[in-house]
Image (spheres, rainbow, N blue to C red):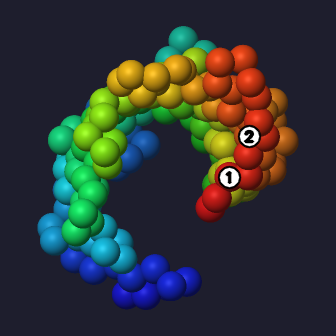
């Protein structure tokens, strides 16, 4: 299947234990010979509905384990554990008012064999009606280098973010 010059082939298999909105529901996602262009994707993603938190918002944990993205000459390995809180729109039938807050961290090895960690410092805010993360920040720590802070701003729906390394900041443009 090719859409917008992106070719996908293989299978994504999702096994549901219950309806996604029900507390305790779990979804396990695996890949079978799955490729996006020339990149093979492997691993397991587990999503668990943890029910409502003290603020009355639905929470999901998302665990990615033993994930690997590889092409003929490069491989990236990573795992992550995140919490997604549905902070707005869960009681309406339209997804366009849905807003999610994401916390957690990731770790792995980049395509050059170097370790990295990514920690969400300020919750990442994702509005369904916007293509980009609209607020929050992460610290990206390469195994042997300075921390890079990626700040997505304070709520505007735009493709801008700021990267700060060793006290020097630069605005960047995000891709789809």
* Image quarter of the N terminus: bottom left
Query: Is 68 rendered above or below residue 41?
Result: above
Disc 2 and disc 1: Cα gap in Å?
Answer: 7 Å
Sequence-wise first label, 2 or 1: 2
> Residue 84 versus residue 53: which sits nearer the camera?
84
- The mark tally for this picture is 2
Q: Is residue 110 left or right of residue 99?
A: left
Question: From this viewpoint, which residue is outermost toward the right?
Answer: 156
Q: Which residue is pictured at 38% across the width and 47% down the height?
A: 20
**Are the residues tagged 2 and 1 within 8 Å (C-beta)?**
yes
Query: Is 104 rendered above or below residue 171?
Result: above
Residue 161's disc is 2
Question: Residue 91's spot in the image, x, y percent?
Answer: 64, 41
Q: Which residue is pictured at 20% across the width and 56% down the height?
A: 42
Q: Which residue is mark 1?
A: 174
> Residue 127 versus residue 79: which sits nearer the camera?
79
- Numbered disc 1: secondary structure: loop
């Amino acid at each position: 299947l090719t859409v917008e010059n992106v070719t996908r082939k293989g299978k994504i298999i999702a096994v549901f234990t219950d309806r996604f909105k029900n507390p305790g529901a779990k979804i396990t996602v695996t890949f079978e010979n799955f490729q996006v262009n020339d990149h093979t994707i492997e691993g397991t993603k587990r999503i668990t509905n943890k029910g409502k938190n003290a603020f009355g918002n639905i929470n999901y944990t998302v665990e990615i384990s033993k994930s690997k993205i590889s092409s003929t000459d490069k491989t990236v390995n990573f795992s992550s554990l995140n919490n997604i809180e549905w902070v707005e729109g869960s009681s309406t039938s339209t997804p366009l008012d849905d807003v999610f807050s994401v916390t957690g961290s990731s770790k792995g090895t980049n395509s050059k064999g170097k370790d990295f960690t990514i920690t969400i410092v300020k919750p990442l805010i994702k509005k369904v009606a916007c293509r980009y993360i609209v607020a929050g920040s992460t610290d990206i720590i390469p195994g042997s280098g300075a921390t890079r802070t990626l700040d997505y701003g304070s709520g505007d729906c735009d493709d801008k973010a700021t990267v700060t390394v060793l006290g020097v900041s630069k605005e960047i443009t995000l891709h789809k």
